[in-house]
Amino acid sequence: MDNVNLVVVLGPTASGKTALGVALAEQFNGEIISADSRQVYRGMDIGSGKDLDEYGDIPYHLIDIVDPGYEFNVFEFQQRFNDAFLSIKNNNNLPLLVGGTGLYLASVLNGYQFTEVPTNQPLRDMLESKSHDELIEHLKNLTPSLHNTTDLLARDRLVRAIEIAEADKVATQPSIELPEITPRIFGIQWEREKLKERITFRLKKRLQEGLIEEVEKLHNDGVSWESLHFYGLEYRFIAAYLQGELNKNDMVQKLNSAIHTFSKQQTKWFRRMARKGTDIIWLDGEDDVYQQALKYC
């Protein structure tokens, strides 16, 4: 790939990103950097869709790097992406950034500059009385370019984003010098009903593989119900079921519907990135995405 030093594979949940990323990594001596806000956490395997068996011998980065309860954020993602990118380049391999967390992807592709920010307890105390919608509005006022808060549905992440944005207003220089990247970006798209079928099938499969038991074990290992609520839809709804707030049938139906909605939000984020100038090569998920991608490599 002439002059390309980073391949990106993005798309909504259940679109087939990992399989394509691994296939391209095998073809071009690549290593995968995960762009997923939950796969960083150890023990969150089935619910976050790590699918580590798909990687085979392909090295991967930013998966299983922190314990649940640790406050991972986009600033640390940038730091760790930078380290992984340079390490892969030093190995004379090709970095592939693969994932669906829009904010993480945009932070690299658009070169967002953040400042290292310690906890601001007075600010957090002030924000405590605000509703979730008020927090979102507050963040939008601080960061007008942020038009979608898909990846800030969790209140603690939203508060942290405000904390960082407030610090950015008075920062004199960024804390991270991002590498120069020349990316080739592939996006996997599906017809809406087909993607919904894939999401429903995958959810049923994960439940059979022990998703409920995974959430129960996380709680038994010390992760609070409140924390589980913030680790994404699967953990939120199953935690509610385990606490007796939902019966199993309602939990599955509501979770399935929520994931469908989330995938639509992801797609909107990626389309907005494209409208704003990010050059995304769209691949048809119903055809052979690997062969489609090779035409551009």
Image (tube, rainbow, N blue to C red):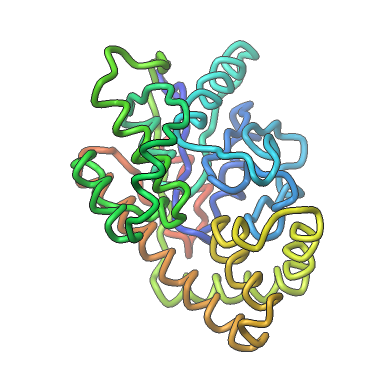
Q: Nearer the viewer, residue 282 or 35?
A: 35
Q: Position of residue 261 (x, y in %)?
A: 41, 70
Q: Position of residue 177 (x, y in %)?
A: 40, 13
Q: Is residue 143 above or below residue 19?
A: above
Q: Quadrant of the C terminus?
A: top left
Q: Position of residue 139 (x, y in %)?
A: 27, 45
Q: Going 39% across and 72% down the picture, which residue do you hit?
A: 192
Q: Position of residue 286 (x, y in %)?
A: 48, 65
Q: Is residue 76 above or below residue 265?
A: above
Left or right: where 102 falls relative to 52? left
User: Residue 240 is drawn in which quadrant?
Assistant: bottom right
Left or right: where 6 falls relative to 215? left
User: Residue 159 is drawn in which quadrant?
Assistant: top left
Q: Going 46% across and 55% down the picture, which residue do you hit?
A: 154
How many numbered marks does the figure carry? 0
Q: Nearer the viewer, residue 122 or 87?
A: 122
Q: Quadrant of the N terminus?
A: top left
Q: Is residue 112 above or below residue 160?
A: above
Q: Going 55% across and 75% down the picture, which residue do you hit?
A: 255
Q: Going 44% across and 36% down the picture, which residue do you hit?
A: 121
Q: Nearer the viewer, residue 110 or 1?
A: 110
Left or right: where 191 falls relative to 277? right
